[in-house]
Amino acid sequence: MISPFSIDTQVIRRIAYAMMAALLAVITLPVFQPKAGAAEQLQSRFIQMSDASPSGGSIVGSPGSGASVTYQVGFTVVTTGANSIVIDFCDGPIIGDTCNAPTGMVATGATLGTTVTGEVVIASGWSVTAASASQIRIADDDTANPMTAVQQSFNITGITNPSTIGTFFARILTFDNETFGTYTGPAGVNVGNYLDYGGIALSINRVITITARVQEQLTFCVTAADPATWLAGGGGTAGECSASEVGAAPPAVVLGHGSPTATLDDSVDLLTALHQCHSWSSS
Amino acid sequence: MIQEVSLKRKRIAFLSILQHYTYEVMRVWKQTIKQALLLLSLLLLIPAVAQAVQSSSSNYQLNEVFFGSGGELNACSGNQYCAKQSAGDLTVGNTKGNQYQAQAGFNTDRSPYIEVVVSNTNVSLGSLAANTTKTANATFTVKAYLAHGYTVINASDPPTNNSYTMNPLAIPTASNSGTEQFGINLAANTSPTSFGADPVNIPDNTFSFGAASPDYSSANLYKYLKNDTVAFSNSSTSTTNYTVSYIFNVSNVTPGGAYVFHHVLVATGTY
C-alpha cells in the first residue's frame, strides 16, 4: 500500500525541470535583444527653443508664430569619437519605441547654425546632411573632428514647431562613423549601432498677448489761478487742468465801475488769464 | 460470543472503508498540492514579465523597483484598462546628490518630462495715460520630471507699436507713472497697486522646487529683458504656479497707437 505521505520524486523532478527551463528562458532573453552594446546616456542634454509657440496660429513673426524657430541642442557625450548625430522628434523619449511625429512639425528646412561650444562646427565640416518633417541628421564630412567629452552646444535653424499645445520629445543618437552607422529608423532594431543616446522633453505652450492703446490727446484750459498753485488740493492732478484750483478760479472781468456797475470811464479794467495747452502722443 | 465476533467484523469493515476513504482524499490533496506548487513556481516568474510591459527601449530601460505595502505599477483589467495603483506610499518625492537623483513614490515614470501650462492668455488694457499705471496678470505652471532642473526665459521683445518698442526696465525698478516703463515680476506686489502673487509650489516646498529668478522676485520692482531667465528649478519638480505681473507706464511723449505684446515663455529642461 502506498503511504499517503510518501513523496512522488518524479513530480518534484518535473516541477524542478519546469522552473529551471523558465528561469533559463528569462536569463537568456537579453541575448536575443536586438542590441546590447556599451552605449551610454548623453549627459546634461537639453534643447532650448527660440520660440515655444505652436505653429499654424494667427500670430505673425517670430517669436510667437512657431515658425523659423532655432533649436539650441546641447549634450555631453560619454563615448567620445562620434562623427554623426540623429535627432528624432517623437511622441515619446524612449529609444527604440515606436515614434509618431509631432503634429505640424516641419524640420525639412533645418540647417546647422552657430556653435556655442564643442566640435559640431560648420567650419570643421559638420552640417545637416538630411532632414525630414521630424528627423534631423547631422554629420561631419570626414572623421577628422569627432566629438570629445566637452559640452556640445549648437543651433539648428529653420524649424517649424508642432502645431499642438503640449509636450513632445527628441531622441538623440550619436554614431561612430559619419554615415550614421547602421541606423535606419527610430523604432526597434532600426536604431542601429549607436554610441550614446538620450531623450529630451520639450513643451509647446500658449502665448500671452497683451494689447493697449496710447491715444493722442489735446487739453486746453483757462483759469485765473497761477499754475504754481495748481496743487490739486481739492482733487484732480497737480499741475494739470484737472487740478481743483483751475476750476475754482475762472477768469472773469467786470467792465465798468460803481454799484450797480453803471459807469464806464477812462480807467482800465485788467484781467489775469492763464491757460495751459497740452497735447501729447504722436507717432 | 457470536455477537462480539459480528461486532468486530463490522468494526474492521468500517476501518477498512475509512482507510480507503482517507487514502483517496490524501491522493486528491497530493494532486492539488502538486498543482499548487507548479502554479506557485510559475507565479514566481511573473515579476520579470511585469517589468517587461513597462515602457522601455530595445536596448535600455530604467527599471522601476517597487517597495511598499500597496499599489501596483501596471494594474490591468482584461485588455481594456490599465492603471498605476497607489496605496500606502512609504515615501514620495525626489532625493538627490551632486551626481545622482532618485524619484520615490508609486507614481513614477522612466520618461523625462516637462509641462508648461499658460493661462489668461489674452489681456486688453484699454487706453494708457501718463498719469496712470496699467497693470495686468497672467499665470503659468511648470513641472519637470527626471530632469536636473528647468529654466523659463522671456523669449519675446517688449511691447511694440509698429516699429516703436516701448522702453523696458533693464534693472529692477519701481513703477513711476508719467515715465515710459514696461516691466514684469513674479511677486506679490503692493505698488502701484496690490496685484500679483509669489510662486506657489504644489503641494508644498518639499515636493516642488520652482522659484522666481532674483531679478524678478522682488515685490514692487519690475524688469524686462529678452532672454532673461524669469523662473527656474535646480531639480526634478512637481508643479509650481507662477503669476506674472505686468506694468505699463507711458509719458507725454510716448508715441500714440496700438501696442501689442506677445509674451513667449520658453521652458527648457536639462536631463
Image (cartoon, rainbow, N blue to C red):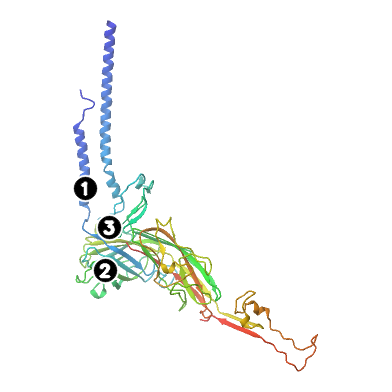
Where does the image place residue A207, in percent across and percent down from the top left? Answer: 44, 67
Lower position in the chain sequence, tag 1 or tag 3: 1
Q: Which residue shows up at 22% across the image and 44% down it?
A: A23
Distance Cα–Cα, label 2 vs label 3 = 19 Å
Left or right: B129, with A205 as reference point: right
Q: Quadrant of residue B205?
A: bottom left
Q: Which residue shows up at 21% across the image and 33% down it?
A: A11
Lower position in the chain sequence, tag 1 or tag 2: 1
Q: Residues within 10 Å of mark 3 (few under 14, many from 20)?
A: many
Q: Nearer the viewer, mark 1 or mark 3?
A: 1
Marks 1, 3 in one chain? yes
Identify the disc placed on residue A138. Answer: 2
- Whether residue B180 can be seen here: yes
Q: What is the quadrant of the N terminus of chain B in the image?
A: top left
- Whether residue A183 can be seen here: no
Secondary structure under badge 3? loop
Distance Cα–Cα, label 1 vs label 2 = 38 Å
Identify the disc placed on residue A27. Answer: 1
User: Of the residues shown, which amino acid type is indicated by label 1?
Assistant: Ile
Q: Residues within 10 Å of mark 1 (few under 14, many from 20)?
A: few
Query: Is there CB contact under 8 Å for labels 1 and 2?
Result: no
Lower position in the chain sequence, tag 2 or tag 3: 3
Q: As rendered, which of A41 and A190 lies closer to the eye?
A: A41
User: Of the residues shown, which amino acid type is indicated by label 2?
Assistant: Ile
Q: Which residue is mark 3?
A: A96
Secondary structure under badge 2? strand
Q: Is residue B30 above or below residue B72?
A: above
Secondary structure under badge 1? helix
Chain for numbered disc 3 = A
